[in-house]
């Protein structure tokens, strides 16, 4: 994202919010496992905006 700062992502499994906004994203998992997620805005991943989802 840092290399392509004007790039917009438009995927069905993402949401983009302006500062102060809130939103909702529903993921339906079809198998068990550990899945990573992260913010793709420049600097946000490095600031800790990431995590894991454990599906049993």
Image (cartoon, rainbow, N blue to C red):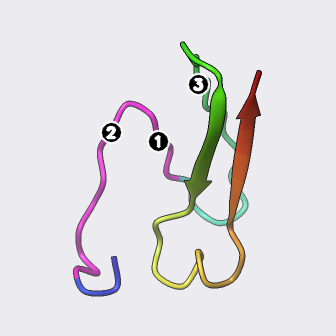
The quadrant in which the C terminus is found is: top right
Marks 1 and 3 close (CB-CB < 8 Å): no
Q: Which residue is mark 1?
A: 14
Numbered range of the magenta stretch: 4-16
The location of residue 45, given as percent across then percent down, is 58, 75
Q: Residue at x 65, y 22 (%)?
A: 32
Q: Residues within 10 Å of mark 1 (few under 14, many from 20)?
A: few
The quadrant in which the N terminus is found is: bottom left
19 relative position to 1: left or right: right
Marks 2 and 1 close (CB-CB < 8 Å): yes
The location of residue 14, given as percent across then percent down, is 47, 42
Of 44 and 16, the residue lying toward us = 44
Q: Residue at x 46, y 81 (%)?
A: 42
The location of residue 47, given as percent across then percent down, is 68, 83
Q: Is residue 11 magenta?
A: yes
Report the Cα–Cα distance between label 2 and label 1: 6 Å
Depicted 12 relative to depicted 31: above or below: below
Q: Residues within 10 Å of mark 3 (few under 14, many from 20)?
A: few
Depicted 1 relative to depicted 24: above or below: below
Mark 1 and mark 3 lie on one chain; the one further toward the N terminus is: 1
The location of residue 11, given as percent across then percent down, is 33, 39
Q: Which residue is mark 2?
A: 11
The residue at the far top in this view is 30
Quarter assignment of residue 29? top right
10 relative position to 53: left or right: left
Q: State the SS at label 3.
A: loop
Q: Which residue is mark 3?
A: 27
Report the Cα–Cα distance between label 1 and label 3: 10 Å
Q: Residue at x 25, y 86 (%)?
A: 3
Q: Residue at x 68, y 68 (%)?
A: 49
């Amino acid at each position: 994202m840092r290399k392509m700062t004007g790039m917009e992502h438009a995927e069905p499994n993402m949401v983009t919010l302006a500062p102060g906004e809130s939103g909702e994203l529903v993921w339906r998992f079809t198998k068990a496992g550990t899945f990573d997620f992260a913010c793709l805005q420049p600097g946000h991943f490095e600031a800790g905006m990431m995590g894991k989802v454990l599906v049993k």
